[in-house]
Image (cartoon, grey):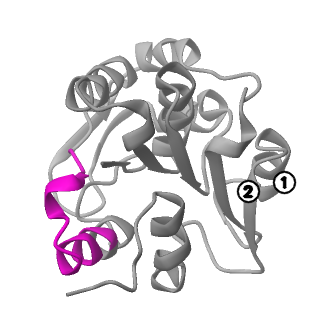
Amino acid sequence: MILYLHGFRSSPLSMKSRLLAAQMQALGREGQWLCPQLPASPKLAIELALSLVKDVAAAELTIIGSSLGGYYATWLAEQLGCRAVLLNPAIVPLIDLEQHVGVTTEFHSDKPFEFKREYIDELRTFAVEKITEPQRYFLIAATGDEVLDYRDMVAHYQGARQLLIDGSDHGISEFADYLAPVLAFCGIDADAAQ
């Protein structure tokens, strides 16, 4: 089972989640793919994620998290003992997200999105100072990320499998090139499409 957690103001319509969903469908494994719309509240986002995977064994679960979703995925992987793939993950989002308090819209729609000040405190609850089992993590970080510093990511996931992209951007525009290694880490042969 793969649980995909999108980033701040993003949605299941993001390019990376759509590519992964299409690949899972091509493999006949769409029933093993979950990508919910996350609420703005970190507490509610974590509660939703936990409710979706409550009956999935840790050995059968991989959480893929992009940006803020990577921050959530790390906390969840530590709690559940499952694998996690981090795509340009946020390491200390409280600092970066302070400037986004207020009402805006989701990236892929005109739907209003409100990030409240109390959500900053909620984020603190899910901080992971140091990952405990690096072999359960796979980091994909782009040196050209215009939002987050890839060096923070590399340091935070020290000892984990790491794929460092020279250049690129926060959204990892060429993510299609990395579908196979991501799915392989999840235990899925991406070349076995029907």
At a point 24% along the width and 57% down the height, the residue shown is: 12
**Viewer-proximal residue, 150 or 17?**
17
Asked if residue 105 lies left or right of residue 166, the reply is left
Q: Residue at x 84, y 54 (%)?
A: 151
Q: Residue at x 57, y 52 (%)?
A: 86
Asked whether, in this view, residue 106 is left or right of residue 154, the answer is left
- Element class at badge 1: helix
Q: Give the amino acid at mark 1.
A: Arg
Q: Is residue 6 above or below residue 145?
A: above
Describe residue 14's horizontal placement relative to residue 125 as left or right: left
Residue 126 pos. (x, y %) = 54, 19
Position of residue 63 relative to residue 187, above or below, is above
Give 95 or 143, whichever is nearer the viewer.
143
Residue 91 is one of the magenta-drawn residues? no
Residue 165, position as x, y percentages in the image: 72, 76
- Which residue is found at the position 54% from the left and 52% from the top? 85
Q: Nearer the viewer, residue 140 or 106?
A: 140
Number of marks drawn: 2
Q: Is residue 43 visible?
A: yes
Q: Earlier in the sequence, mark 2 or mark 1?
A: 1
- Which-is-in-front pick, marks 2 and 1? 2
> Which residue lies under the disc numbered 1?
151
**Label 2 crowd (10 A; few <14 / some 14-19 / many >=20):** some
Q: Split into 4 quadrants, where in the image is the C terminus?
A: bottom left
Magenta span has 21? yes
**In the image, which disc is placed on residue 161?**
2
Give the image quarter of residue 149.
bottom right
Vertical placement of residue 20 versus 77, above or below: below
- Mark 2: which amino acid? Arg
Q: Residues within 10 Å of mark 1 (few under 14, many from 20)?
A: few
Q: CA distance from mark 2 to mark 1?
A: 15 Å
Which is more toward the observer, 190 or 94? Answer: 190
